[in-house]
Amino acid sequence: MTDAKPTILIVDDDPIVLALLQKLLAATCDVLTASAGRQAIDMFQLGEDTIDIILLDLGMPGLSGYDALAELQLLDPDVKVAIITGMDPDEERLPGVLGILGKPFRPSEVAEFVRQVMQV
């Protein structure tokens, strides 16, 4: 019997980034995607027990990644979140995140980044 794959929720407003990350991680993770912060919060509330980690972009219209992180942490203080962003992150506004991966990234960096943050 094989171990179940971890479930990862990728949140990014760029459909190309979502598709790329989904393709890169599908072999090792069950991948869910959300294109906005509010959508991610709704998905997390519905599947909180099954989502192992959230990869969250910071620069999104509407609810920013910073605000989405704060709401997710109110819902579950132990939520596991890692950041993937093209912005220069304000780390003081990112308490408890497991790691930050800057865009642009090489495809090989994504799998290693996810592997590392899953071990935290």
Image (tube, helix red, strand yellow):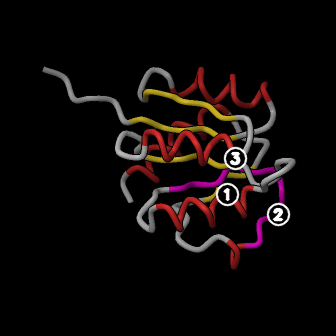
Q: What residue type is labelled 3?
A: Arg
Q: Which of 47 and 11 is in front in this view?
A: 47
Q: What crowding class fits label 2: few (fewer than 14 Cα within 10 Å), some (14-19), or many (20 or more)? A: few
Compared across the picture, whether 42 is left or right of 6 comes to right
Q: What crowding class fits label 3: few (fewer than 14 Cα within 10 Å), some (14-19), or many (20 or more)? A: some
Q: Is 47 situated above or below 23?
A: below
For the residues labelled 3 and 1, say whether their Cβ atoms are less than 8 Å apart.
yes
> What secondary structure is marked by label 2?
loop
Residue shown at 45% from the left, 51% from the top: 116
**Which residue has dot 1 on it?**
68
Residue shown at 70% from the left, 74% from the top: 93
**Which residue has dot 2 on it?**
88
Q: Which of marks 3 and 1 is nearer the N terminus?
A: 3
Q: What crowding class fits label 1: few (fewer than 14 Cα within 10 Å), some (14-19), or many (20 or more)? A: many
Q: Which amino acid does label 2 sit on?
A: Asp
The quadrant of the image that shows the N terminus is top left
Which of the two marks, 2 or 3, is nearer to us in this view?
3
Distance of label 1 from label 2 (alpha carbons): 17 Å
**Which residue has dot 3 on it?**
38
Q: Earlier in the sequence, mark 2 or mark 3?
A: 3
Place of residue 52 in the rendered image (x, y in percent of width and height, measured from the top left):
40, 45
Q: Nearer the viewer, residue 100 or 41?
A: 41
Q: Is 78 situated above or below 29?
A: below
Q: Give the range drawn in magenta.
A: 81-90
